[in-house]
Image (spheres, helix red, strand yellow):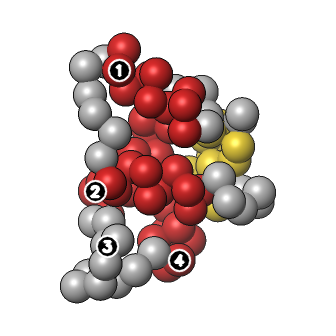
Amino acid sequence: PLERFEEYLQSRGQRNTKQRKFLIERVFSHHEHFDADQLMDQLPRKGNPDYVSRPTVYRTLNEFVDAGLLRSFELNGRSVYEHDY
């Protein structure tokens, strides 16, 4: 997933930030579906190393979907994500 995401970012002239790398490791180390709030609950809190803001989480999840790494679907009125790679 990391190589594929880096190719996706390069094709758009973007760089792979520390936060994106951290999120890719976290998301692809688990194999169940999840929503953004569940992911946020697993991440370090503000003021701790590897903290990632809520807007960055949402933006990066959308990038993972655009890159073909995650699939997004609606479940009970919320966006849920699962591996597509």
Q: Quadrant of residue 16?
A: top left
Q: How many badges with numbers are in the image?
A: 4
Q: In this view, does 46 lie above or below 24?
A: below
Camera-side residue of 39 and 78:
39
Kindly identify the residue that appears in the image at 29 percent across and 84 percent down. 48
Are the residues flagged by discs 3 and 1 in contact, CB closer than 8 Å?
A: no
Instruction: State the CA–CA distance, disc 3 to disc 2.
Output: 12 Å
Question: What's the mark number on residue 55?
Answer: 2
Mark 1 vs mark 4: in front = 1
Badge 3 amino acid: Tyr
Q: What element carries label 4?
A: helix
- The amino acid on which the numbered mark 1 sits, given as a three-letter code, is Gln
Kindly indicate the quadrant of the structure image that contains residue 29.
bottom right
Asked if residue 79 lies left or right of residue 12, the reply is: right
Which mark sits nearer the N-terminus, 1 or 2?
1
Which residue of the protein is positioned furthest toward the top in this rendering? Answer: 11
Which residue position holds label 3?
51
Residue 36 is labelled as none
- What secondary structure is found at the residue carrying circle 1? helix
As drawn, the label of residue 42 is 4
On-image quarter of the N terminus: top right
